[in-house]
Image (cartoon, rainbow, N blue to C red):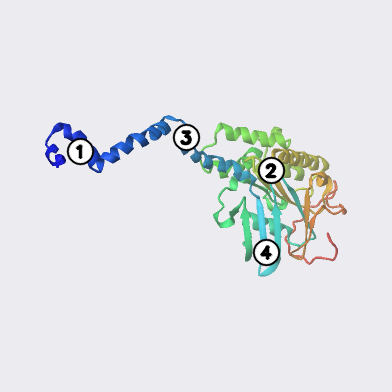
Amino acid sequence: MSSVISRTGEAVEADSGPAQHPGPARRSLPASAAPVAASADAPATVPMAAPAAVPATAPKAAPTAVPVRLRGAVASLGGRPVLRGIDLTVRPGEVVALLGANGSGKSTTVKTVIGSVPLEHGALELFGMPYAKFRSWHRIGYVPQRTTAASGVPATVREVVSTGRLPQHRLLPFRRKDRAAVDRALDAVGMLDRAEDGVAALSGGQHQRVLIARALVGTPDLLIMDEPMAGVDAASQQVLADTLRREVERGAAVLLVLHELGPLEPLIDRAVVLRDGCVAHDGPPPPNTGQHALPGHDHVHPHTDDHLTTPGLLA
């Protein structure tokens, strides 16, 4: 009853608080407000948004993803099957050699990895990303067979190596750091003093060094080389071995197409031997026999994977 009368008094408005629902809400607010205010004052709860820093660490973890994972790869050239269900994995920091006879599928395998030969069946992942979604091509450096690169191009050594920076800055003007990267890559292969010379005037070994510098100029996480030792002299072979050693020490993964291991043998972690488009061996490198990798062997013919193979692991 007094509550009806008291509704008109000012003093009662303080009493009406407990009698109405807003009253208890106000009482509970001071009780809960203390923790809320405390959590607002405590800097630990403001950085609770710091889990947004987790995405910031994700890109750093990306380089540890498996650079190459090829499963059940089937591919053809000119309507003729070349790869018949190949499995290939290249792990971070690993040096893998693809070995085999002419026509065994070595070059076709690396061309499926870089996308120049499409897969008919199978799956390819690059750095943990399905091939169809992969866009970070600057993370891959590719050295083709020397005979597949035009030797009469009217370009200087510097201009050829500079094209290796295109995936990073596309058609934007060259920056100072791009020019510095070109100089470093040329110096790494001992060709800085020939930077302004035309590539058409180079020897086979020097031309190969330029192609390697072009692949290195983007500081790739994966380096793919197709017959890098073919037809090069002893000095160029040693430059290649030293360059690969530095890349491995930096943490890059390397996939090499070779006929024999030659001076690269100490660097090889695993050998994958192909025969008739299938994996015949995946494990420790077999003993290095044969003459293709020896200095003085003018091995300039390309391996187009269009020959029949002969019996034997590497034959």
Assign a secondary structure to mark 3.
helix
Residue found at x 75% / y 58%? 303
Looking at the image, is mark 4 or mark 3 nearer the viewer? 3
Q: Are marks 1 and 2 in contact (CB under 8 Å)?
A: no
Amino acid type assigned to the residue bearing label 1 in the image: Ser
Residue 41 placement, left or right of 243: left
Q: Is residue 191 visible?
A: no
Amino acid type assigned to the residue bearing label 3 in the image: Pro
Q: Quadrant of residue 209?
A: top right
Q: Which mark is residue 72?
A: 4
Residue 26 percent across, percent down from the top left: 28, 37
Distance from the alpha carbon under mark 3 to that under mark 1: 41 Å
Q: Residues within 10 Å of mark 2 (few under 14, many from 20)?
A: many
Q: Residues within 10 Å of mark 3 (few under 14, many from 20)?
A: few
Amino acid type assigned to the residue bearing label 2 in the image: Ala
Report the quarter where the C terminus lies.
bottom right
Mark closer to the chain start, 3 or 2: 3
Residue found at x 69% / y 58%? 109
Q: Are marks 2 and 4 in contact (CB under 8 Å)?
A: no
Mark closer to the chain start, 4 or 1: 1
- Circle 2 sits on which residue? 252
Mark closer to the chain start, 1 or 2: 1
- Circle 1 sits on which residue? 16
Assign a secondary structure to mark 2.
loop
Question: Furthest-bottom residue in view?
Answer: 79
Residue 129 percent across, percent down from the top left: 58, 53
Distance from the alpha carbon under mark 2 to that under mark 4: 25 Å
Assign a secondary structure to mark 1.
helix
Mark closer to the chain start, 2 or 4: 4
Q: Is residue 181 visible?
A: yes
- Circle 3 sits on which residue? 47
